[in-house]
Image (spheres, rainbow, N blue to C red):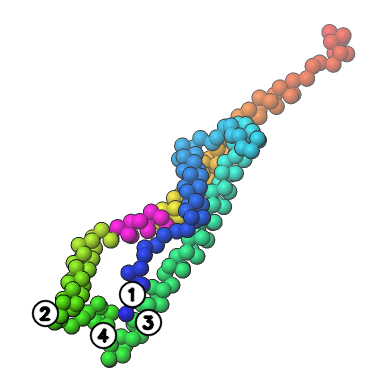
Amino acid sequence: MPDPSQAEPFTVADETRATRRNLLLVSSLAFFIGYSGVLPKEVSFLGLKFNSDQQESVSWFIFFITLFLFLRFLSSLAVELSVYLKPKAYFKAYKKNLLAHPALDESDWMDMAPPADPYNLDEVQDEAKRKAKWSSQKAVRPLERFVWLKLLLETLLPVVFPIVAMICLVCAINQNAEQDGADQPATAPKSKIESNVNPKPESEVRSQ
């Protein structure tokens, strides 16, 4: 009986791959800003130029772009993973139910055949092909375990890294807002003193 676990490895669609690329690029920018704590001072986008007075707005703009790409990639990845894992889950449940029957065992899922007739060249060739197949699969089995690393890089990393980047960016934005709030009171008394210094009335000057 065919096992879907021997099918082609999981790959994402071209549209999902493009979204993942854009997500990693924007997430890298968000992570750099959040890790360094330095908000962008001047950004040009679609003919619009943002100066240093709009640092917080630009940072929030980068955050929401990252969030949008993250949700888009996550939804596409979830759909593709469900399509890829559905046959495997079905086969696992199907095999479990059949093995509950006493007439079936694990050998029904193995590519087994009776010993070849040494006088039948066709059977000898078939047995040689089966042995070559099993030996080659055994030889490359350690390399096949790297499929989990591939799956990690293609699915888990693009999900975890944007979350970390957005958290770092929000922390940097809040820290910058707290610094601005702490700097404002320091300059307030000075402006208040200057506003209270009024020129003397003209009548007082004449009386002197």
Q: Which mark is residue 118?
A: 2
Between label 3 and label 1, give the one nearer the viewer.
1
> Magenta segment, which residues?
145-155
On the image, which quarter does residue 10 sit in? bottom left
Whether residues under marks 2 and 4 lie with C-beta atoms below 8 angstroms apart, the answer is no
Q: Position of residue 190 (x, y in %)?
A: 66, 24
Q: Is residue 116 magenta?
A: no
Which residue is painted at 61% across and 34% down in the image? 44
Q: Nearer the viewer, mark 1 or mark 2?
A: 2
N-term mark: 4 or 3: 3
Mark 1 — residue? 3
Q: CA distance from mark 2 to mark 4?
A: 29 Å
Q: Amino acid at mark 3?
A: Tyr
Mark 4 or 1 closer to N-term?
1
Q: Main secondary structure of the magenta part?
A: helix
Q: Please identify the quarter of the rendering in which residue 58 is found.
A: top right
Taking 74 as reference, is 190 left or right? right
Q: Secondary structure at mark 3?
A: helix
Q: Earlier in the sequence, mark 3 or mark 2?
A: 3
* Amino acid marked by disc 2: Pro
Amino acid under disc 1: Asp
Gap in angstroms between the C-alphas marked 1 and 2: 30 Å
State how far apart marks 4 and 1 are (Cα).
15 Å
- On residue 105, which mark appears? 4
Q: Quadrant of the N terminus?
A: bottom left
